[in-house]
Image (cartoon, grey):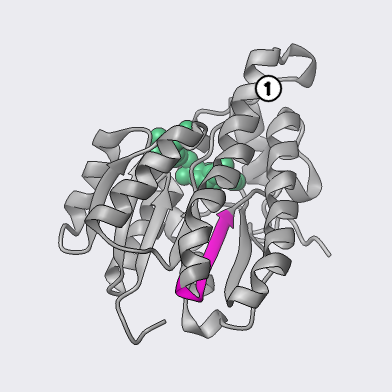
């Protein structure tokens, strides 16, 4: 993967963890498409390293928009060999308060988003004969999280999707791995319920939130030559909050 410049597509690149991943991939020399629903936010990310990063808009929940992104990437940048699905969204509330509209939005962004992105980009990656996919799931999807039942279900789905795709894509030399952040200091986490935030932070053995860069580092590892024989794996980055078997 180091013989020619990597081309990476990162969703959710306008904020938090996706932004940190985009900047870290760019810092090692990759050409990175910073894709986000919020184009202005993606442009702000790209402005940090304009030689390596280009901003594009996408709604990962909308298959037509994902196909349009694929065309734009192919025309303006090339065939990506790295795909990182970091876009995500949630609001904490009791399951009994959840409306159908809320449930469908959570599943559309967090589960169908990675499905659409993998479905759109994998054909070219298989033709090119290799690549790396890294999906951002959540420890909520491994061990559950009160107030996040539907999100946890969607993230559990991302984990199962990643393992199944890893099996199917192995013959194409494409690895598929999952990073599960624990509570991480990003706008998404800060928007959650105050009590839940305080309780989670107290429960972390390190007694602090993760910084987005600490979650980006293992994503960059999975997207590197060093991880060439690692696929279908799930790594928690949670300061010891979860130690799932
Ligand atoms: N922050 C945490 O504590 C935490 C914990 C576990 C998992 N995660 C996961 O990590 C990933 C990154 O989260 P974050 O904390 O950096 O969030 P964030 O809110 O800071 O950033 C998410 C980005 O995704 C974009 N986005 C939202 N919906 C989109 C859509 N439909 N299409 C394209 N882009 C969209 C937003 O505009 C935003 O820029 C998410 O998948 C999230 O579920 C975060």
User: Residue shown at 24%/35% (left/top)?
Assistant: 40
Which image quadrant is residue 179 in? bottom right
Q: Is residue 98 left or right of residue 127?
A: right
Q: Please identify the residue farthest to the right as the structure is shown.
A: 245
Image vertical order of residue 110 relative to residue 53, above or below: above
Give residue 78's position: percent from left, percent from top: 30, 63
Q: Residue at x 58, y 77 (%)?
A: 173
Residue situated in front as seen by the camera: 55 or 205: 55
Q: Quadrant of residue 96?
A: top right
Question: Residue 234, how many percent across, how many down?
Answer: 69, 63
Classify the position of the N terminus by image quarter.
Answer: bottom left
Relative placement, left or right, of 89 versus 233 is left
Per the image, label 1 sits on a secondary structure element best described as: helix
Residue 233 in view: no
Which residue, given by chain and number where applicable, does mark 1 sit on? 103
Instruction: State yes or no: residue 166 in magenta.
Output: no
User: Residue at 36% of width from left, 44% of height from top?
Assistant: 69
Q: Is residue 57 visible?
A: yes
The quadrant holding residue 53 is bottom left
Seen in the picture, residue 15 relative to 216 is either above or below; the reply is above
Task: Look at the image and say whether residue 133 sits in the magenta stretch.
Answer: yes
Residue 242 image offset from top left, x and y in percent? 74, 56
Q: Reply above or below: 123 against 18.
A: below
Other-residue count near label 1 (Cα within 10 Å), few / some / many at <14 / 14–19 / ≥20: some
Quadrant in which the C terminus appears = bottom right
Q: Which residues are magenta?
A: 128-135
Of residues 211 and 94, the one drawn nearer to the viewer in this rendering? 94
Secondary structure character of the magenta stretch overall:
strand
């Amino acid at each position: 993967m180091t013989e020619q410049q990597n081309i990476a597509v990162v969703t959710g690149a306008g904020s938090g963890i996706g932004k940190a991943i985009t900047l870290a991939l760019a810092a090692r020399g990759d050409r990175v498409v910073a894709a986000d629903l919020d184009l202005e936010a993606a442009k702000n990310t790209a402005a940090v390293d304009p030689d390596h990063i280009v901003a594009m808009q996408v709604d990962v929940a909308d298959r037509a928009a994902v196909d349009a992104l694929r065309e734009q990437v192919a025309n303006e940048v090339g065939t990506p060999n790295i795909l990182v699905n970091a876009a995500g969204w949630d609001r904490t509330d009791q399951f009994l308060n959840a409306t159908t509209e809320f449930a469908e939005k959570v599943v559309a962004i967090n589960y169908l988003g990675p499905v659409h992105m993998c479905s759109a980009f994998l054909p070219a990656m298989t033709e090119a004969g290799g690549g790396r996919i890294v999906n951002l799931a959540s420890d909520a999807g491994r061990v559950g999280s009160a107030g996040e039942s539907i999100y946890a279900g969607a993230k559990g789905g991302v984990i199962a999707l990643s393992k199944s795709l890893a099996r199917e894509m192995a013959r194409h030399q494409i690895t598929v791995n999952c990073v599960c952040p624990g509570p991480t200091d990003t706008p998404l986490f800060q928007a959650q319920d105050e009590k839940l935030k305080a309780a989670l932070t107290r429960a972390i053995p390190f007694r602090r939130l993760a910084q987005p860069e600490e979650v980006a580092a293992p994503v960059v590892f999975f997207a590197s030559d060093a991880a060439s024989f690692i696929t279908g794996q799930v790594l928690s980055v949670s300061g010891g909050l979860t130690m799932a078997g």
